[in-house]
Every structure is written in C-alpha cells, then in structure tokens.
Image: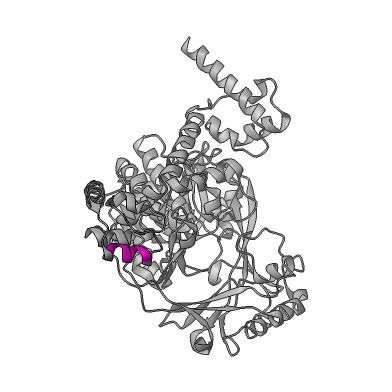
C-alpha cells in the first residue's frame, strides 16, 4: 500500500458497486486502491440475500459477459435457484438465486485479495481531494492521504445515513455499521446537487421457531444451472423456501401501531422504493387488500436466520413482534434482527455523463446507490462501467458507453443520467424497449466482444465463449439438414406436447418453430448433444424470429438518433423557438446525443426538431 503516493484509480466503498469497479480497473491494468470501512463487510447483503430476478438477472448475465465477477459470486454462494417469468416468454425469463451472504462476500474478498494491481485498505474516507475541478484522491479519518488519477465513489447507503426503528432514530449505516458522515459533508462541499432517499429492510426470524410444515414450500429447480457463462453448472437442492401470507389480523395490528410508525407520523419525509414498498406503506396505500404474499427465505442453514421477503418495515419492535406472529407458520417466531428504515444522501444522477463521470468534477466517477438506484445487481452493473471508464481514462482512451439497444445496464444508466430519479430506482423489464434483443440467453453474444475489446475479458473466457458459439452454429447447421419423419413414436411425443401429428417429413428447425414444441423434445428426436442452454437459445430465436426482426428495425431508427452528437459547447439560449421548459432541461442535463435529448422528460418533439436543425447547421458550417 502506497500512503501518500499515487495510484491510477481509487475506489471508495467495497459493496457490490465498489467490488466490481475495483476488479474491472485492476484487471484492465490500472494500479488500484480499494478503501472500505470494514474488510469483513465486503459485498455485504444487508437486505435481501438473493441475486437475480426479472431484469436483475439479465444485468448479472451482462456483467459476466463483460468480464465482471457478480455471476461467479452468485453461483458460488447459491443455495436455492429458480427460473422466474417462465410463463411470460423468453424476453423476460431469468434466474433468481437465494445466496449465502457469507459465501458471497468471501468469494468477492478472495477475488479482490488475489487480484494483481489491486491494494485493499480498511479505512474510513473523510474527505474527497479536489484540485482545479478535478478529483485527486482521498483523505481518510486517520489523516493519511491517497492520490490517484481517477476516483470512483461507491458509497452505498452510508452517506449521512440514519436508521429508524419506530420513532427511535440514530446515525448508522446498514446493519449497525459506521455511517460516512464526515465524507458526506465533504461531498456536499463539491457543489454537486445532493438529495435524500430511503429504503427499508425486513425483520430476520430464527429458523427453528417457524412451523415449516404448515407452509407451502418452494423447491429449487432440479436441473444443473448457473448465472455465469464460464463456470460449471450444478444442482441446488439444499434449501427450501416457504410461502405464506399476511391476514386481516396482521393488518389490524400494524394499524394499531401507526402512531409509533415513523412513516405514518411523517418522520420519514424521504422517498422509498416504489416497487418494493414496506408492509406499513402497503397497508396505508392499499387498504382494500386484506392479504399480501410473504416468502420466508433461509439466509444460511448454519446461521438459522430467515429473511421475511415482502415484509420490510420501520415499525417499532413491539409492532414487528406482534404482527409477525399473526402470520401462518410464524405464530411462535422469534425475531433475531428487527426491520428498519435507512435514510441516506445520494447524488442527483443527471449530473453524470453516460460513462458515470460527474460533469462538475472531472475524473470523479459514481456507481451504485449513490446514484439513486436500489439493488445489488444495479449497483454491480454501474460499478463495472465506472471501473472500466476510470481505467480507460488512465490509459487516455475514450469512454465506454452501453446503449439502450445493447444491454439492461445501458437502459439503467441512460435512465439515470437522462431522467434522474426521485425514488430508489429499480431496474424492471418494462423499462427496456428492446426486450427480445436483450434476453438472458444472449448476453454473451451481445457483450463478450465488448469486454474483450476493452481488455477485461481474459483469454480463457473468450475461448470458452467462441467454443460455445461454434457449437451452437454447428448444431444449427446440422439441424437445417435434419428431417424428422412421421412415426408412431414421434407423433406420440408430439401429442404429449400438445402439438399436431406429422403426416410427412419435416425439418427439425421447422418443427422447433411450433410454439408448443420445446427444445428438449427436438433434442430427443435428433439425438442432439448440445448444451440445453444453447438449444433453448436456438429455439427462442426461431420462435420469435418475426418479432426480433421488427425490433432490429426499431433499433436501426434509434441508432440514427444516437449517432447525432450534440456539441459540448452548444448554446441552447441561441436556438430560436425552443420552449422555455425544454431549453432549461437541455441546459441542465447537457445530453450527449439527439437520442438522449429526446428522452428527457419535459422536452417536446418540436424542440428536438429545432435542436436537430441547429446540430446540422453547425456541422455544415464546420465542414465548409
């Protein structure tokens, strides 16, 4: 460790964003320092002990395809795995894993401690060092200074954070950790616009005090599976999750304690997550509902802790005990840790470039919940992009930006820097316009080459990707010439699948186009040895071929708008005819392209047309 000397990149915070940023920068050759409050809290899971789910699972696959670590960590720590959205089509189908937080953190810790070009140091950041409008390093609470060409802030929910349990409030980070109060004050002095957000956590129950026999149980999927494209698939059978529900008595007790609820009494004035509201918030907003689903998810068998999914709360401890014990299966449950609300500072993300560098302070990159997002996966995706761009800046190379048409990570970042957020932003499949092109199964095709191009994806992963792609193409070619003939056995299997019988021979790919015919059946009929995951990909591309082609045409139109760069020195006040609101929004956000400008709320199409004319006029003058 080089106290007082120079690093290429300093990453502050070792949560999901910070870990990915530090690994990306160091793997790309940048001499990197990762600072964290506690080495034992690396990649901590203070909320839900799970990775994946709709949109989030897509992000994990994208991180993996680019060369990040999140998927491998999830596979290593997974105890229970399920496919979600299987009935809603290939575009939104993805994996969700229940993970051991300890194993997940240990995986990242090992990756960080064994990574070349990377130093770790336990220390509390106290002051961001800025000179002439550029980030230069950080001073820690013990007085030492570390300097770097680029600084990545991945501070999570620690900035000036406060915890609420009932009306009791204290300064604290998640799970009782030390808050970054001094560093939050330093960040406010930079002139960046700062806001406040809130998130809530659930109580943790003792495994042995739950009546598991009375619950509807959810088992893990039975086939070998993995998030990572590059690791070994395995079956996860060691854990069962329980499904139960709240009831009228649960809601009555929660209402009884409203006067001791910080949310109800107005103590919490910050916005919480819209798509993951607390149980008390649900009862306030949806009084007509007399029941809400609850999932009891064991955290680790050895720890005996159980996470109560869908029951986040900031109610007083008495309310938590009484309400939990009205739920079926939890009549004698003991709370090991109470739920709580946590408020924290965040930086308004419209102050960021699409490569996650702040506009006011050069060489300062932000990633994760400091940008207003919620979720481990969203944080990890941003961390990866921030780390890549910090390393590219050190090299003197241009920025790395993923488009909305290329990845969920691209959609996430574009939404943040273009639209901003007033509540913790959660990635949803509905936010993505090109879902059929950004599937769980094709992340490698979309992004492995990009990870390779920036120097993040190593040789062995690239070779494994090329081998898989070659096997897929060879199998596709084999099936093009393979004919399936009508036999009693074939027609019996088709009948079992709900498909009409064959009266004459048909090509294997043509049969696979039938909506009800799955890859598994065609693989049996053609003696295919292809990895089922790649076979499912072939099936999806055939079944949705028309829709995919339609979306590709939409992308071509989208890209024409994205190609039109807006000059950095453009004077919006000089463009005649712009609406007052549009002019103000454009000047504040400073979009990089005409496409980004068109997505800013409050900028009408007429303003975009005038802006296009101004850009073209400026280009012609430059070329003249």
Q: Position of residue 382 (x, y in %)?
A: 46, 50
Q: Main secondary structure of the magenta part?
A: helix
Q: Residue at x 50, y 27 (%)?
A: 565
Residue 334 visible in the shown view: yes
Q: Residue farthest to the front?
A: 503
Q: Is residue 493 magenta?
A: yes
Q: Position of residue 438 (x, y in %)?
A: 43, 48
Q: Which of 97 and 39 is in front in this view?
A: 97
Residue 1 visible in the shown view: no
Left or right? Give the position of 88 relative to 343. left
**Total numbered badges shown on the rendered structure:** 0
Q: Which of 379 and 220 is in front in this view?
A: 220
Q: Position of residue 191 (x, y in %)?
A: 61, 43
Q: Splitting the image into 4 quarters, where does residue 579 fall? A: top right
Q: Is residue 251 magenta?
A: no
Q: Nearer the viewer, residue 138 or 35?
A: 35
Image coloring type: one colour
Quadrant into which the N terminus falls: bottom left
Q: Where is residue 540 in the image (x, y as percent from the top left)?
A: 38, 52
Indicate whether 331 appears above or below 85: below
Indicate whether 62 appears above or below 264: above
Magenta residues (range):
490-495
Q: Splitting the image into 4 quarters, where does residue 235 fall? A: bottom left
């Amino acid at each position: 460790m080089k106290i007082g000397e120079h690093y290429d990149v300093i990453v502050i915070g070792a949560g999901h964003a910070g870990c990915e940023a530090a690994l990306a920068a160091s793997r790309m050759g940048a001499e990197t320092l990762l600072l964290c409050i506690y080495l034992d809290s690396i990649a901590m899971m203070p909320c839900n002990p799970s990775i994946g789910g709709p949109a989030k699972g897509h992000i994990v696959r994208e991180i993996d395809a680019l060369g990040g670590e999140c998927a491998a960590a999830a596979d290593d720590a997974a105890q229970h795995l399920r496919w979600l959205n299987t009935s809603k089509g290939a575009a939104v189908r993805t994996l969700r894993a229940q993970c051991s937080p300890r194993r997940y953190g240990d995986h990242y810790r090992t990756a960080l401690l064994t990574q070349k070009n990377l130093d770790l140091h336990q220390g509390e950041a106290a002051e961001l060092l800025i000179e002439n409008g550029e980030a230069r390093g950080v001073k820690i609470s013990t007085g030492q200074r570390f300097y770097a060409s680029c600084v990545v802030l991945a501070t999570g929910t620690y900035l000036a954070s406060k915890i609420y349990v009932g009306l009791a409030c204290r300064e604290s980070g998640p799970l009782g950790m030390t808050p970054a109060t001094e560093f939050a004050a330093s960040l406010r002095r930079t002139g960046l616009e700062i806001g406040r957000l809130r998130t809530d956590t659930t109580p943790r129950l003792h495994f042995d005090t739950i009546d598991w026999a009375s619950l509807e149980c959810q088992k893990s999927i039975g086939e070998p599976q993995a998030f990572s494209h590059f690791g070994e698939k395995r079956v996860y059978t060691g854990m069962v999750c329980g499904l139960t529900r709240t009831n009228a008595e649960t809601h009555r007790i929660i209402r009884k304690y409203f006067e001791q609820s910080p949310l109800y009494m107005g103590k919490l004035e910050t916005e919480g997550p819209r798509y993951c509201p607390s149980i008390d918030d649900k009862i306030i907003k949806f009084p007509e509902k007399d029941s809400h689903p609850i999932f009891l998810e064991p955290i680790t068998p050895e720890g005996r802790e159980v996470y109560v999914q869908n029951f986040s709360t900031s109610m007083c401890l008495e309310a938590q005990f009484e309400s939990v014990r009205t739920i079926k299966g939890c009549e004698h449950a003991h709370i090991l840790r109470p739920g709580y609300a946590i408020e924290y500072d965040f930086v308004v993300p419209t102050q960021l470039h699409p490569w996650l560098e702040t506009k006011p302070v050069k060489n300062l990159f932000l990633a994760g919940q400091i940008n207003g997002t919620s979720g481990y996966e969203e944080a990890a995706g941003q961390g990866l992009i921030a780390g890549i761009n910090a390393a590219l800046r050190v090299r003197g190379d241009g920025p790395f930006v993923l488009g909305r048409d290329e990845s969920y990570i691209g959609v996430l970042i574009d939404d943040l820097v273009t639209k901003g957020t007033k509540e913790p932003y959660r990635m949803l499949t509905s936010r993505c316009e090109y879902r059929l092109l950004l599937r769980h199964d094709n992340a490698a095709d979309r992004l492995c080459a990009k990870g390779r191009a920036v120097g993040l994806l190593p040789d062995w992963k690239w070779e494994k990707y090329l081998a898989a792609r070659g096997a897929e193409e060879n199998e596709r070619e084999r099936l093009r010439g393979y004919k399936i003939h009508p036999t009693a056995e074939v027609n019996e299997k088709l009948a079992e699948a709900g498909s009409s019988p064959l009266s004459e021979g048909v090509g294997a790919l043509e049969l696979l186009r039938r909506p009800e015919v799955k890859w598994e059946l065609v693989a049996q009929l053609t003696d295919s040895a292809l990895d089922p995951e790649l076979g499912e990909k072939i099936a999806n591309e055939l079944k949705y071929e028309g829709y995919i082609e339609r979306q590709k045409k939409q992308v071509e139109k989208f890209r024409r708008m994205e190609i039109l760069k807006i000059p950095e020195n453009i004077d919006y006040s000089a463009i005649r005819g712009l609406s007052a609101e549009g002019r103000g929004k454009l000047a504040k956000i400073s979009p990089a392209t005409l496409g980004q400008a068109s997505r800013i709320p409050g900028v009408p199409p007429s303003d975009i047309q005038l802006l296009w004319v101004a850009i073209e006029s400026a280009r012609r003058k430059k070329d003249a």
